[in-house]
Image (cartoon, rainbow, N blue to C red):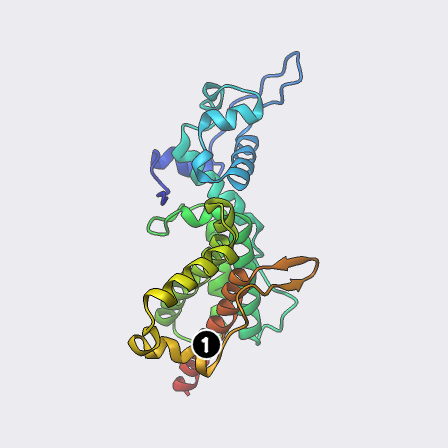
Amino acid sequence: MVVFAGQGDPRRSLSLLWRAETPPPTRGGPGPKPRLSVDAIVAAAVALADEEGMGALSMRAVGDRLGRTAMALYTYVPGKSELLDLMYDAVHAELPTGYPESDPADWRAALTAWAGEVLEFHVRHPWVLQVSQARPVLGPHEYAGLDTLVTLLRATGLEAGVLRRLVGTLFPFVRGSAQAVADARLAAAATGSSDEEWWAARSAALLELVPDFAERFPAVSGLEVEGPVEPYPAAVQEGTEPVPYPEREARETFRVGLGVLLDGIEAARADRT
């Protein structure tokens, strides 16, 4: 499921994102119902998407969470399209906008820290991964995140044209890595079978049906011979939570891939001298 941002009225959407319009007055009254506001509606919508996924998002479902009808929400947010924009931008406020603990000259350490933060952000809010990057939201927190990355990249000393392309490389790489982690966490619940069961059944069937697999796909098979990975069912301990093999592989792929990308930036810097 892919959704596109920026489908509502441009002026109204941007006014809400940048809080440039005067919010409607809140009306008090008897009873325990909380007063509505744009921020309260967005917070309820984010909580819903975090817990139940993008497919559960609707104005009615958000209204139910707030003890109001969907119609009551339209006074504050025109519709689901505008709400999605607001949700997307609001959660981006979680991302750091600076790395003062790092040496400003150590661009590699700063970019590594940035990539890790962005990965975990998307894992916390996997529904964000369903919002296409083809059309940006153009909200303040989205811009703050972009400004942070550009600032970190400027420390490499590379020219602006290259930096633009690096932004277009690093963001999709981190999002793709986060998608792999999120999918690894979701697969068992979504399919009803554990990773161990899935692999055991299909590995046995594949070996039986394709006995010449190694001869037909020598390059792939060679990876196992040259550098075999740990047996699939293994899990490691990170803190107090066991990490299943698929997620561990996704995170290791992220670590190695990021290192290679940063090596490429280092090589580009060397070519300039």
- Which residue is most to the bottom? 273
- In the image, 259 versus 154, the foreground residue is 259
The correct choice, above or below, for 91 with respect to 266 in the image is above
Q: Position of residue 184 (x, y in %)?
A: 49, 55
Q: Position of residue 226 (x, y in %)?
A: 45, 83
The answer to whether residue 23 of the structure is visible from this angle is: no
The correct choice, above or below, for 117 with respect to 163 in the image is above
List the residue tagged with mark 1.
260
Could you tell me how many numbered marks the image carries? 1
> Identity of the amino acid at label 1?
Val
The correct choice, above or below, for 242 with respect to 254 in the image is above
- Which residue is most to the right? 240
Other-residue count near label 1 (Cα within 10 Å), few / some / many at <14 / 14–19 / ≥20: few
Question: Which residue lies at the image location 60% right of the left edge and 22% below the top edge?
Answer: 35
Q: Quadrant of residue 106?
A: bottom right
Helix, strand or loop under label 1: helix
